[in-house]
Image (cartoon, coloured by chain):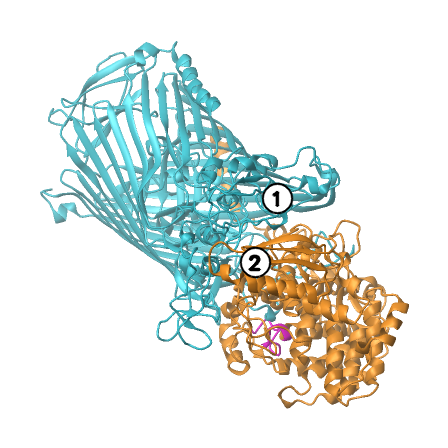
Chain colours: A cyan, B orange
C-alpha cells in the first residue's frame, strides 16, 4: 500500500516539475448576448483541452491560454463562437442566439451534417464527457449518457463490454455495435467473450483499445436508419469515434493529463458469522474429513481441528473475504503535443495506463502512441494521416464463472482465516503429493486456493494493435470534392496460461498458449457534389465505394502433465497438441450513394442505397442492396410563428433496410481431422452442423419516427424517438434433434422484432448569473420479441447452469434472454409439495422466470458551475429485467450466506403437502437439507436488475497556480465512479455484471469481480 | 500530373466492385476435408470411440454419477465426499441431461457414417453398412434402455426436423430386423474389402474380422430378444433361437481398449475423475456387489476392489439440528454393517456424544447404497472398499486401464443359460458355468481358481428351482458387468436381481436412505433432457402419453 501511495504522489510531482519552464498568459474579458447584456455562466474552453472556466455574474471570465490557442465560448441557447488568442490579453465576445438549427454532427461515413436535416436519431458525446471520470474502456463511460444504449460489463481489468443499441437484432453471438474510428471500421470482437457458467476469460478488443484522451467526440448512430450507409455491417448500429487532431492556427502546445483513482470493493455478499466449517452440524475430526462447506457447529471458540492440522479456536472470521481484496489503483497519464504551421497540423499523444486490480497480483499496463498530421498540399489537395500503436499487457485477469477466483474466495468457510491461505504449497515439495495445493478443504482435494490462482498460476494476455489511415482529399471544383482513404487495423493477441503442478484441476500441470491475429484493410472513396437544383431546392450527392478485406488466423497449443513438476515449459510436458487456423479471408466490396435534398430550409429528404458483395456467401446470394429514406420537417414557423414557445419544432421519419452477413466457410460440408485420434489411429469428425450453400444475409428493416423540440429560448430541449426494427432471415445454427443426423442446421430463419422509445429532456434549470445548473434526463425502453424460428422449433438455449436448474433462452413469443428454471412444486390447491422425507420438490426447469433485458434504462446528468468551480454528476439506473444470481445460490448451498442461518438450530417441518399422499407434511429436515434443496431451485435466486446508482461525480477547480507553474492552466478535478446505490434490489451482486460479453453471457451473475468504487483526481496541465 | 494520378485512383476504385473472382476460392476451408478425400474406415473408429468412450462430461455424469450407482456397483456419499449418495434419486436436470445429450447427440456421428456407406452413399460398401447397422443396434439398445422411447423410424433423415418418437418395443423389433439384415449382408465374408476398403486396425473391436461382427450381431439380437421377451406379451423366442443357431460371441469378447494417453476431453476413463479429484469425487464398491463376491468366495473380489484401510474413528453427535437424535441409530447401523461384512470392529458404544470404533484393515466392506446426507458424517472412507487400481488408474501414467465392455462371451453364455431356463434351447448349467469362466478370465483370474470356484461354490451350479436359477444367472450377469453400469442396471430392472433399495421394498427408512423424487422407488429410467423438450417437445409429449409420465419411476416395457 505504501508503494502505491508513493507512486500516486510521485506521478503528480513529476508532472508539476515538468511544467515549470513553459509559458502561458492570462486572458480575460466579458461575454454578452446579442444586445450587449452580460451572460453569466457561459463556458469558455481552450479547444482540444479540458481547460475551461465559466463567466461570473457580470459575464466576466479569466482563463490561462497561450497565443495561438482557440477559445471556445458557449452558452445554452446561443451559437458557439471560437476566437484565436492573439497578442491581446482581453477578448470580449458577443454571442448570437442559437436558433438550434446550426448544430453539426458527424454522420455515417464521417460526413458532417447539420443535425436539423437528419431524419433519424443521433447522439453525440463530447470528449469531456468521457475524459473526466475516466475508465480504461471508453464504452463504460457511455453508460447512462445515451438513450437506447445498453452496456453491460464482465467487470475485470482488460475485459470488454457488451454494447447493444436498440436491442438484440440477431440470434447469434454478434449483436454488438460496429465501431468506426475516423471513418475506418475496426474489429470489435473479443477473441473470447465468455458466457460459460464455469470459467470465462473475457478478453477486450475494439473500443477498449482506444485511448480516451485521443477522443474528440463519439457519435452513436442508433439503429439501421442512421447507419444505413454501412449496409451489411449496420445491423447492430454504429458507434463513430472521432479522434483529435491538431488545430489549424494554434501554436506549439503541450497538454498533460493525469488521472489517478483508488478502487475499492463497493460491497460484498452478506455472509453469516455464526457457524463454522463442517457438515451436518459436525466439525471435522480428522484431516481426511474436511469439507469446504460451513455447515458445522456454532463457532463458539472451542478448540477444533484446523485444516493445517493444528488445533485452533473455532471462531468466525467476518473479514476473511474482504481481506483477500486489495485497494486497486488506476493511473492513466498522458501527454499530448500539438502544433501547426501555415498549412499543416500535427498532434502526438502518448498515454500510459497502469492499473492494479483489487485482486492480488493482477495488473494491466498499456501504452498508446498516436500521431496525426494534416496538411493542405495545395489549394485543392489535402492529406490527413494517422498512426496509432497500442500495446497492452494484462496479468491475472479474474475469470468469471463458478471456477473463477472470486467464486473461490466467496466460498471460504466462515472459520478459516484468509491469511492462512497465503501458504498455498508445501515448502520444498518432492513428490507429486507434496505439490498439491493447500486449501481449506482436505489436502489434495480439488478445492482451489485463491492465492495460488493469483500468484502461482499465470494468466497473461498481450495485445498489440496497429491502426492507421491515410486520406487524400481533393476539391475538384467549388461544387465537387472527393477523397480516397486507406485504413488498416491489425491486432495480435497472445494468451498464455500456466496451471502449476499440484493445481486443483490440473494436478500434473498444464500450459496453454494461444495467438490470434485479426486484420482489416479498408480502401474507399467518396465523391461529394453540391448543387442548387432550383432556388429553393438544394441537393448534396455522395457516391462512394469500399473494399473491405478482413483476415483472421490463430494458433493454439497446450501441454499437459509436467515431466518434472518444478517448472512449466512446453518441452517439459508429456502430452502436447497444436491447432492451427490458417488465414481466413473475408472480402466485402461495396458501392453506395446518398442524395440529400433540402427545400426552403425547412423540409429535408435523404435517400441512400448501398450494394454489398460478400465472399462468405454463394455466387447467387452474395450481392445485395440496402436502401433508406429519411425525412425531416422543421415546423416551428407553422406551429408557432411568433416563437412564443418553440424555437424548434421538428418531426422526422425514416425507413431503412440493412443486413448482417456471416463468417467464412459456412457453405460447404467438410470433415475435420482431430489432432488426437484414438489409440494413435486417425479418426474423422463428421460435422454436427448441416451447412447451407444457399445462405443469405440477414435482413433488418427499421422504421423510426421522432420529434425534436426546443423551447423557451432554447432553454428546454426535448427529443423523442419511436422505432420498430424487424430482423428476418436470421443466420443461425438452429439446434435440432440429433436424430436428424445433425445437431444444428445452419439456416436463414425466423423473425426478431425490437420496438422501443427513446426520450431525452434537457436544459437550463437555473441561471442566476453566479450559478448555473444544466440538467438532462435520458430514458429508453426496448421490447424484444422472438416472433418465429423454423417450423416445429420454438426454443433456443444459450446457457445452462451446471445443475441445469436455469437456462438462458430465446423462445418464440418471448424474447432473447428469457430465463427459464425450476420452482418449488405446488399442488392444484397451491400448497407447496415435499417428498416423504420433508424436502421441497422442484419442478422441471421449464418455468418462465423473467428476461435478462431491462425494461427501461435511464440517466440523469447534471452540471453546476459557480465561478471557477464546476460540479458534474451522473445518476443512472436500469429498471426491470431479471438476473439469476448463482453467487447467492452457491453461498446458500455452502452455508456461508447470512440467509443460511435460517432453520440451522431447529430444523424445519415445512408447511407443505406430501408428494406421495397429499397429506400435510410431518417430516422435519435440517437447515442444511433445507438450503441444500432450496439452493437448487432457480426461482429463489432470480433478482430484479432494477438499480439506481451515482455513476459518476466530479468537482473541478481551475487552480490559480498556473502562472507560478508557468502553465496556461492547471485544472484539478476530484472524481468518483460508482459511489453508491440509491437503490438495488438484487442481493449479493451488481445486477449489471454478466458472465460474458456475448449474447449467452447475459442473465447470469456468477463469479464476477466485485464492483469497485473509485475515487481519485484528474489533473490537466496545459502549456 | 497530380490530377491524373487522382483520376486514375478514382477510376481504379470504381471498377473494383466487379472483382469478385476470387470470392469462391477464399471461402474454401483449407483445414477441412471433403467427402472425396476420405475413407470409410476412419469413421468406424470415430463411431466406436464416440459412443463407448465419450469425453469426461457425459462419462462422469453417466456411469459415475448415475448408472453404476443405480446398478448398486458403486456408492459415494462418504464423509468428505462432494456428494451425498442420494444424488440421482432426485431429478437434477443438468446431470441426467448431460447423459441425454450424449446419447441423443451420438446419432449425428452414426448417421454421417451410415449415410456414406449405405447403398447409394459416397463410400458405398455393404460390409461397412453391416457394421453401421450393428453399431446402430448397440446404440439404440443402450439409448432406449436408459431413457425409453426415442426417434427411430423417422430418424437420420435431415428432411424431418422433428422426428416422431417410437416406443421401446418398436425400437427393439426394428433393431432386431436390422441386425438380421446385417447378418445377411456379412454372410461368409471375413473382411470389408481390400486396399482403402480394408478396415483392419481402425476397427477397435475386432480388427476388421467380419465374422466376429456377425457374432456380435447375434449376441446383441439374443440379448434384446430375451430382454424384450414377455414384455407386453411379446414372444421373441424365435429371435432367441435364430440368434443362438446363427452363432453368438461364444469365445470372443467385444471390448474397446482404452487409450491411456488421450485427453479427457476426447475420451474419458474412471481414472480421469478418480485421479485429479482425489477425495471429493471418489466412490466405493457397493455393499451388494462386495457381499455377493465375498460370501461366495468369488476370486474376483480382489480383482474388483481393495480391502479397507480401517483405523480408529470417533463418531460425534451433531450439536444442532434434527440429526442430533439420530446419532445412535446411525452409528448402530454402521457398526452392524461393518460386523456383518466380517470386519474386526472394537466398539466403545455411545458415551455421551461420542462413539469410538476401531476397525482393522484387510476386510472387504462395501458401502450400502442410497445413503442420505444425514448418515454421511459417519461414513468414513477408510471403512469401505475402493475399486481396484486397474479400474481407476489415471491416464498418462503408463499403468493399464480395464477396457470398455461392449459385449462379452460370458454374457452370450449367461443369455443362453437364461434362455434355456425359459425353455428356449438347452444346456443351461453348462452355459452358466462357461459364462462364469469367461467372466473371470476377463479379469485375469487364474484357471485353477476358476476351477475351484466352479467345483466348490453352490453359487456356481444351477441346482435350484427355475426362479432360483434365473436369480443366479442374473446375478452373475450383473457381476460380470462391473464397469459397465448401463447394462448392469438393465439386468436389475429386467430380472429383479439382485434386490436393491427401492426395488422390492419401496418403504425405505428416510433417516438414512435417500427417498428422493422417486419417493423410495427404484429408478427405472432417466428423464429426457431439456433438449428433447426444447427441440422436439410435441413428439416427447406424444411419446409420454403411451409410455407414462417422464419420471424416473416409469417402467419400460421389458422391466419386471
Q: Are marks 1 and 2 in contact (CB under 8 Å)?
A: no
Q: Nearer the viewer, residue A298 or A100?
A: A298
Mark closest to the chain's N terminus, 1 or 2:
1
Q: Residues within 10 Å of mark 1 (few under 14, many from 20)?
A: some
- Does the magenta-highlighted stretch encompass residue B155? yes
Q: Which residues are magenta?
A: B145-160
SS state under label 2? loop
Pinpoint residue A739: horizontal percent, then vertical percent: 60, 71
- Residue B207: x %, y % from top left: 83, 65
According to the picture, the residue beneath numbered tag 2 turns out to be: A618
Tag 1 residue: A553
Where is A180 relative to A7, above or below? below
Quarter of the image with the C terminus of chain B in it: bottom right
- A387 relative to B546, above or below: above
Asked if one can make out residue A370 in the rendered structure from this viewpoint, the answer is yes
Q: Give the residue at x 58% y 46%.
A: A441
The chain to which mark 1 is attached is: A
Q: Residue furthest toward the right?
A: B448
Work out whether residue B244 or residue B362 is closer to the camera in this orientation and state it. Answer: B362
Label 2 CA crowd tier, 10 Å (few <14, some 14–19, many 20+) = many
Residue A328 higher or lower than B57, as above or below: above
Left or right of residue A804: residue B501: right
Left or right: A553 with respect to A883? right
Q: Nearer the viewer, residue A143 or B143?
A: B143
Q: Are marks 1 and 2 on the same chain?
A: yes
Q: How many marks?
A: 2
Q: In which quadrant of the rendered view does residue A726 lie?
A: bottom left
Q: Position of residue B204 (x, y in %)?
A: 79, 64
Question: In the rendered structure, does residue A450 fall within the stretch colored magenta?
Answer: no
One can see residue A657 in this view = no
Q: Secondary structure at mark 1?
A: strand
Task: Name the dominant secondary structure of the magenta segment.
Answer: loop
Amino acid at each position: 500500500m505504501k508503494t502505491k501511495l508513493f507512486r500516486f504522489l510521485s506521478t503528480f510531482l513529476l508532472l508539476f516539475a515538468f511544467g515549470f519552464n513553459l509559458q502561458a498568459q492570462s486572458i480575460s474579458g466579458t461575454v454578452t448576448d446579442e444586445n450587449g447584456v452580460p451572460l453569466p455562466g457561459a463556458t469558455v474552453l481552450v479547444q482540444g483541452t479540458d481547460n475551461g472556466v465559466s463567466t461570473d455574474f457580470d459575464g466576466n471570465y479569466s482563463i490561462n491560454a497561450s497565443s495561438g490557442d482557440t477559445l471556445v465560448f458557449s452558452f445554452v441557447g446561443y451559437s458557439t463562437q471560437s476566437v484565436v488568442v492573439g497578442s491581446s490579453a482581453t477578448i470580449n465576445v458577443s454571442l448570437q442566439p442559437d436558433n438550434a438549427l446550426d448544430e453539426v454532427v458527424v454522420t455515417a461515413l464521417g460526413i458532417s451534417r447539420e443535425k436539423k436535416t437528419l431524419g433519424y436519431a443521433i447522439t453525440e458525446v463530447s470528449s469531456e464527457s468521457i475524459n473526466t471520470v475516466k475508465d480504461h474502456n471508453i464504452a463504460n463511460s457511455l453508460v447512462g449518457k445515451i438513450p437506447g444504449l445498453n452496456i453491460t460489463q464482465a467487470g475485470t481489468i482488460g475485459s470488454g463490454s457488451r454494447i447493444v443499441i436498440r436491442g438484440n437484432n440477431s440470434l447469434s453471438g454478434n449483436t454488438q455495435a460496429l465501431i468506426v474510428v475516423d471513418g475506418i471500421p475496426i474489429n470489435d470482437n473479443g477473441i473470447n467473450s465468455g458466457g460459460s457458467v464455469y470459467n470465462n476469460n473475457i478478453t477486450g478488443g475494439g473500443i477498449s483499445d482506444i485511448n480516451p484522451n485521443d477522443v474528440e467526440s463519439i457519435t452513436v448512430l442508433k439503429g439501421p436508419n442512421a447507419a444505413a450507409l454501412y449496409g451489411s455491417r449496420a445491423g447492430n448500429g454504429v458507434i463513430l469515434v472521432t479522434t483529435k487532431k491538431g488545430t489549424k492556427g494554434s501554436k506549439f502546445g503541450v497538454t498533460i493529463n493525469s488521472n489517478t483513482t483508488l478502487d475499492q470493493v463497493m460491497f460484498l455478499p452478506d455472509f453469516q458469522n455464526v457457524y463454522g466449517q463442517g457438515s451436518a452440524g459436525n466439525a471435522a475430526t480428522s484431516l481426511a474429513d474436511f469439507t469446504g462447506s460451513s455447515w458445522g457447529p456454532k463457532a463458539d471458540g472451542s478448540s477444533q481441528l484446523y485444516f493445517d492440522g493444528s488445533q485452533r479456536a473455532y471462531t468466525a472470521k467476518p473479514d476473511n473475504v474482504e481481506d483477500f481484496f486489495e485497494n486497486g489503483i488506476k493511473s492513466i497519464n498522458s501527454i499530448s503535443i500539438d502544433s501547426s504551421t501555415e498549412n499543416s497540423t500535427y498532434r502526438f499523444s502518448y498515454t500510459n495506463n497502469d492499473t492494479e486490480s483489487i485482486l492480488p497480483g493482477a495488473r494491466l499496463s498499456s501504452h498508446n502512441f498516436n500521431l496525426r498530421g494534416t496538411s493542405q498540399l495545395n489549394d485543392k489537395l489535402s492529406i490527413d494521416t494517422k498512426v496509432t500503436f497500442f500495446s497492452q499487457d494484462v496479468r491475472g485477469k479474474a475469470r468469471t464463472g463458478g471456477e473463477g477466483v472470486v467464486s473461490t474466495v466467496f466460498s471460504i468457510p466462515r472459520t478459516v482465516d484468509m491469511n492462512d491461505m497465503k501458504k498455498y504449497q508445501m515448502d520444498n515439495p518432492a513428490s507429486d503429493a507434496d505439490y498439491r495445493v493447500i486449501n481449506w478443504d482436505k489436502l489434495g482435494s480439488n478445492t482451489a486456493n485463491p492465492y495460488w490462482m493469483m500468484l502461482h498460476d499465470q494468466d497473461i494476455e498481450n495485445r498489440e494493435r496497429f491502426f492507421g489511415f491515410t486520406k487524400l482529399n481533393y476539391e475538384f471544383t467549388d461544387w465537387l470534392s472527393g477523397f480516397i482513404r486507406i485504413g488498416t487495423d491489425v491486432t495480435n493477441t497472445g494468451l498464455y496460461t500456466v496451471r502449476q503442478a499440484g493445481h486443483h484441476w490440473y494436478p500434473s500441470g498444464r500450459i496453454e498458449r494461444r495467438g490470434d491475429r485479426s486484420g482489416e484493410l479498408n480502401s474507399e472513396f467518396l465523391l461529394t457534389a453540391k448543387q442548387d437544383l432550383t432556388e429553393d431546392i438544394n441537393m448534396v450527392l455522395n457516391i462512394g465505394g469500399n473494399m473491405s478485406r478482413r483476415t483472421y488466423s490463430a494458433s493454439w497449443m497446450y501441454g499437459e502433465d509436467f515431466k518434472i513438476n518444478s517448472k512449466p515449459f512446453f518441452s517439459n510436458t508429456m502430452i502436447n497438441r497444436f491447432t492451427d487456423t490458417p488465414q481466413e479471408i473475408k472480402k466485402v466490396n461495396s458501392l453506395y450513394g446518398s442524395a440529400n435534398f433540402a427545400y426552403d430550409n425547412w423540409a429535408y429528404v435523404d435517400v441512400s442505397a448501398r450494394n454489398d458483395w460478400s465472399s462468405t456467401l454463394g455466387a447467387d446470394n452474395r450481392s445485395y442492396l440496402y436502401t433508406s429514406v429519411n425525412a425531416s420537417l422543421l415546423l416551428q414557423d407553422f406551429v408557432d410563428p411568433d416563437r412564443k414557445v418553440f424555437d424548434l419544432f421538428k418531426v422526422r421519419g425514416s425507413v431503412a433496410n440493412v443486413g448482417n452477413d456471416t463468417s467464412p466457410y459456412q457453405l460447404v460440408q467438410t470433415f475435420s481431422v482431430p489432432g488426437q485420434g484414438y489409440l494413435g489411429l486417425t479418426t474423422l469428425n463428421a460435422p454436427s452442423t448441416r451447412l447451407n450453400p444457399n445462405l443469405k444475409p440477414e435482413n433488418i428493416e427499421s422504421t423510426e419516427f421522432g420529434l425534436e423540440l426546443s423551447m423557451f429560448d432554447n432553454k428546454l430541449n426535448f427529443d423523442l424517438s419511436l422505432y420498430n426494427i424487424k430482423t428476418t432471415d436470421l443466420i443461425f445454427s438452429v439446434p435440432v434433434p440429433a436424430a436428424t443426423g445433425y445437431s444444428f442446421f445452419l439456416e436463414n430463419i425466423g423473425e426478431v422484432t425490437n420496438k422501443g422509445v427513446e426520450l431525452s429532456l434537457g436544459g437550463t434549470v437555473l441561471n442566476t448569473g453566479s450559478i448555473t445548473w444544466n440538467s438532462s434526463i435520458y430514458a429508453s425502453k426496448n421490447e424484444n420479441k422472438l416472433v418465429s424460428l423454423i417450423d416445429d422449433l420454438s426454443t433456443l438455449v444459450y446457457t445452462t447452469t451446471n445443475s441445469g436448474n436455469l437456462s438462458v433462452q430465446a423462445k418464440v413469443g418471448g424474447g432473447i434472454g428469457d430465463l427459464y428454471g425450476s420452482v418449488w412444486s405446488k399442488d392444484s390447491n397451491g400448497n407447496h409439495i415435499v417428498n416423504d422425507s420433508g424436502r421441497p420438490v422442484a419442478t422441471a426447469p421449464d418455468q418462465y422466470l423473467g428476461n435478462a433485458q431491462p425494461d427501461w434504462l435511464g440517466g440523469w446528468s447534471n452540471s453546476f458551475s459557480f465561478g471557477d468551480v464546476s460540479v458534474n454528476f451522473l445518476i443512472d439506473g436500469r429498471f426491470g429485467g431479471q438476473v439469476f444470481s448463482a453467487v447467492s445460490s452457491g453461498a446458500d448451498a455452502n452455508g456461508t450466506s447470512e440467509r443460511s442461518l435460517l432453520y440451522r438450530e431447529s430444523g424445519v417441518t415445512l408447511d407443505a403437502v406430501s408428494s406421495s399422499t397429499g397429506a400435510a407434511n410431518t417430516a422435519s429436515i435440517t437447515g442444511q437439507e433445507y438450503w441444500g434443496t432450496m439452493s437448487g431451485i432457480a426461482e429463489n435466486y432470480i433478482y430484479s436488475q432494477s438499480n439506481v446508482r451515482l455513476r459518476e461525480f466530479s468537482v473541478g477547480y481551475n487552480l490559480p497556480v498556473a502562472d507560478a507553474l508557468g502553465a496556461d492552466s492547471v485544472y484539478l478535478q476530484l472524481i468518483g465512479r460508482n459511489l453508491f446505490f440509491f437503490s438495488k434490489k438484487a442481493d449479493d451482486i451488481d445486477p449489471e455484471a454478466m458472465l460474458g460479453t456475448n449474447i449467452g453471457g447475459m442473465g447470469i451473475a456468477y463469479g464476477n469481480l466485485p464492483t469497485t468504487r473509485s475515487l481519485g483526481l484528474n489533473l490537466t496541465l496545459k502549456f | 500530373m497530380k490530377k491524373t494520378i487522382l483520376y486514375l485512383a478514382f477510376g481504379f476504385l470504381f471498377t473494383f466492385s466487379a472483382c469478385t473472382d476470387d470470392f469462391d476460392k477464399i471461402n474454401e476451408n483449407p483445414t477441412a476435408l471433403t467427402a472425396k478425400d476420405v475413407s470409410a474406415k476412419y469413421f468406424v473408429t470415430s463411431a466406436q470411440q464416440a459412443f463407448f468412450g465419450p469425453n469426461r462430461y457425459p462419462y462422469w455424469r453417466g456411469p459415475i454419477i448415475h448408472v453404476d450407482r443405480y446398478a448398486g456397483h458403486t456408492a459415494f456419499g462418504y464423509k468428505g465426499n462432494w456428494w451425498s449418495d442420494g444424488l440421482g434419486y432426485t431429478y437434477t436436470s443438468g446431470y441426467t441431461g448431460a447423459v441425454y445429450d450424449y446419447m441423443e447427440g451420438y446419432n449425428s456421428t452414426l448417421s454421417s457414417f451410415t449415410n456414406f456407406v449405405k447403398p447409394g452413399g459416397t463410400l458405398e460398401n455393404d460390409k461397412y453398412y453391416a457394421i453401421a447397422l450393428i453399431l446402430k443396434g448397440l446404440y439404440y439398445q443402450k439409448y432406449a434402455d436408459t431413457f425409453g422411447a426415442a426417434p427411430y423410424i423417422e430418424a437420420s433423415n435431415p428432411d424431418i426436423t422433428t422426428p416422431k418418437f417410437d416406443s421401446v418395443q418398436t425400437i427393439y423389433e426394428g433393431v432386431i430386423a436390422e441386425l438380421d439384415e446385417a447378418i445377411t449382408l456379412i454372410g461368409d465374408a471375413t473382411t470389408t474389402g481390400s486396399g482403402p476398403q480394408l478396415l483392419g486396425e481402425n476397427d477397435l473391436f475386432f480388427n476388421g474380422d467380419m465374422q466376429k461382427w456377425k457374432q456380435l450381431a447375434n449376441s446383441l439380437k439374443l440379448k434384446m430378444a430375451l430382454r424384450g421377451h414377455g414384455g407386453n406379451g411379446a414372444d421373441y423366442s424365435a429371435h432367441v433361437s435364430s440368434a443362438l443357431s446363427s452363432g453368438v460371441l461364444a469365445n470372443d469378447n467385444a471390448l474397446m481398449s482404452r487409450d491411456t494417453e488421450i485427453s479427457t476431453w476426447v475420451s474419458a476413463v474412471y481414472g480421469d475423475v478418480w485421479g485429479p479429484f482425489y477425495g471429493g469425487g471418489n466412490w466405493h464398491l457397493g455393499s451388494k456387489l462386495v457381499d455377493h463376491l465375498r460370501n461366495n468366495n468369488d476370486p474376483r473380489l480382489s480383482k474388483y476392489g481393495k480391502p479397507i484401510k480401517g483405523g480408529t474413528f470417533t463418531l460425534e453427535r451433531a450439536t444442532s439440528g434434527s440429526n442430533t437424535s439420530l446419532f445412535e441409530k446411525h452409528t448402530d447401523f454402521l457398526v452392524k454393517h461393518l460386523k456383518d461384512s466380517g470386519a474386526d470392529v472394537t466398539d466403545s458404544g455411545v458415551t455421551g456424544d461420542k462413539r469410538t470404533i476401531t476397525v482393522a484393515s484387510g476386510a472387504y466392506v462395501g458401502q450400502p447404497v442410497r445413503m442420505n446426507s444425514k448418515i454421511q458424517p459417519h461414513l468414513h472412507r477408510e471403512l469401505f472398499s475402493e475399486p481396484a487400481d486397474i479400474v481407476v488408474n489415471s491416464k498418462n501414467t503408463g499403468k493399464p486401464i480395464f477396457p470398455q465392455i461392449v459385449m462379452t462371451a460370458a454374457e452370450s453364455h449367461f443369455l443362453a443359460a437364461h434362455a434355456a431356463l425359459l425353455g428356449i434351447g438347452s444346456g443351461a448349467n453348462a452355459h452358466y458355468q462357461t459364462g462364469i469362466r469367461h467372466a473371470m478370465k476377463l479379469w485375469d483370474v487364474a484357471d485353477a481358481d476358476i476351477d475351484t470356484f466352479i467345483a466348490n461354490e453352490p453359487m456356481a451350479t444351477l441346482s435350484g428351482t427355475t426362479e432360483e436359477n434365473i436369480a443366479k444367472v442374473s446375478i452373475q450377469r450383473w457381476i460380470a458387468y462391473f464397469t459397465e453400469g448401463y447394462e448392469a442396471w438393465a439386468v436389475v430392472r429386467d430380472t429383479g436381481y439382485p434386490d436393491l433399495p427401492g426395488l422390492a421394498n419401496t418403504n425405505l427408512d428416510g433417516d438414512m436412505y435417500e427417498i428422493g423424487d422417486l419417493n423410495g422407488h427404484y429408478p427405472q429410467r432417466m428423464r429426457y433432457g431439456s433438449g428433447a423438450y426444447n427441440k422436439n417437445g410435441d413428439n416427447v409429449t406424444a411419446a409420454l402419453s403411451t409410455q407414462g409420465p417422464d419420471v424416473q419411476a416409469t417402467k419400460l416395457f421389458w422391466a419386471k
